[in-house]
Image (cartoon, rainbow, N blue to C red):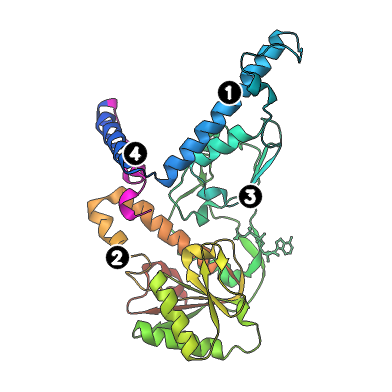
Amino acid sequence: MSAQFRDPWEAVTLPATRDQAVPIWQLTERFAQRLDGLGRQTWAQVAERAARLEIEREQRMEAVERQREEAGGLDNIHLQDSSAGRLRPRYRHIVVDEAQDLQPGHWKMLRAMVRRDRNDIFLVGDTHQRIYSSQVTLGSLGVNIRGRSSKLSLSYRTTRQILGSALGVLSGEAFDDLDGNEENLAGYRSVLSGGLPALHQHVGWEAEREGIAELIAGWDDIPLEQIGVCVPTNVMVTETANTLQQFSIRATEIGPDGPRGDEGVHIGTMFRFKGLEYQRMIIAGASQGLVPRSDILRLRSADALRHRKEMQRARSLLFVAATRARDSLDIFWHGTPSQFLQPLLSTA
Ligand SMILES: Nc1ncnc2c1ncn2[C@@H]1O[C@H](COP(=O)(O)OP(=O)(O)OP(=O)(O)O)[C@@H](O)[C@H]1O
């Protein structure tokens, strides 16, 4: 999907009154019509369509159940819609991981796919790791987590030092608990201890890549596949892989479906690292203008709300990358360091 077909709601400030809302609805309608004319849909529209189909299916099932109850529970009653009589809930239980990144359409679809019961949906999520614009209030979507959720605050993956630095990246932002309430970072801890993240400043991007290659060349005690290198853009992924090749270090890019090969250092953009884990993690290109991107910085005066949301996502991306590390974290940049690194720089 090209950038011009972004979800129209992404940039919208909620209107205070109905009069203010009408032009926005009209604009959204026109946008949808234009897409229809082109035979295209946004991802959010696809999810909403899937949700509608599942909700209609659920409603047909409920109608049959009502008819059966009214007929005294008899199974062989004559149903107006005989095909509906054979419908069953698709699933008894659904497990959702990375719940923070699901949009309302996804939740509505899942809600309709499973019979409402005590243990119908089990979900795990971390709103600090939200890297898509998908804030929801689960209660309003029929997913009741109030009073039924537990906070997992002990990290078994990473060291206290890396976790502390990653949490520092998020400082100053407010996060939600998936149900419309504020979530806080208090109590996060780790039983493991290790070195502080190492910070590496270079004069330019090429020097930075060479610095990464030299660092990795010195690590002969672990398999290359246990090393992750995370960069801000796809072009930087390719450039980093080329530099590593020049240093005779095998590398494999992480694509949308995971690493493309079995061997070598894994290189990918921050988005690709969701859910992964590496013994040694390198974050490269952590320069102001790349993390966060300069177009996000420019939004500040033009669209303050959008700026705030995009800044939070950019912080979360960096947080995701940093928390992939088990034993060590090395952060590289050239030029001005990312403003998100300030807490780390001031304690270094
Ligand atoms: N109870 C435990 N005891 C020891 N190690 C554990 C325990 N639970 C998880 N781990 C280890 O901690 C690491 C992280 O676990 P896991 O991937 O389940 O976390 P996660 O919350 O899904 O992470 P993320 O959402 O950040 O990707 C893994 O290496 C896992 O083996």
**Is the C-beta separation of discs 1 and 2 under 8 Å?**
no
Dot in front, 3 or 2 = 2
Could you say whether the residue bearing mark 2 is in a helix, strand or loop? helix
Circles 3 and 2: CB distance less than 8 Å?
Answer: no
Q: Which residue is mark 1?
A: 59
The part of the image, by quadrant, that contains residue 328 is: bottom right
In this figure, which residue is indicated by the disc labeled 3? 151
The residue under label 2 is: 294
User: Depth-wise, is mark 4 or mark 1 nearer the camera?
Assistant: 4
Residue range of the region highlighted in magenta in the rendering: 1-18
Q: Earlier in the sequence, mark 4 or mark 1?
A: 4
Splitting the image into 4 quarters, where does residue 16 fall?
A: top left
In primary-sequence order, the first of circles 3 and 1 is 1
Q: Tell me if residue 48 can be seen.
A: yes
Q: Is mark 2 in CB contact (under 8 Å) with mark 4? A: no
**Residue at 70% in and 13% down:** 68
Name the kind of residue labelled 1 in the image: Gln
The answer to whether residue 170 of the structure is visible from this angle is: no
- Identity, as a three-letter code, of the amino acid under mark 2: Ser
Q: Is residue 17 magenta?
A: yes
Q: Are marks 4 and 1 in contact (CB under 8 Å)?
A: no
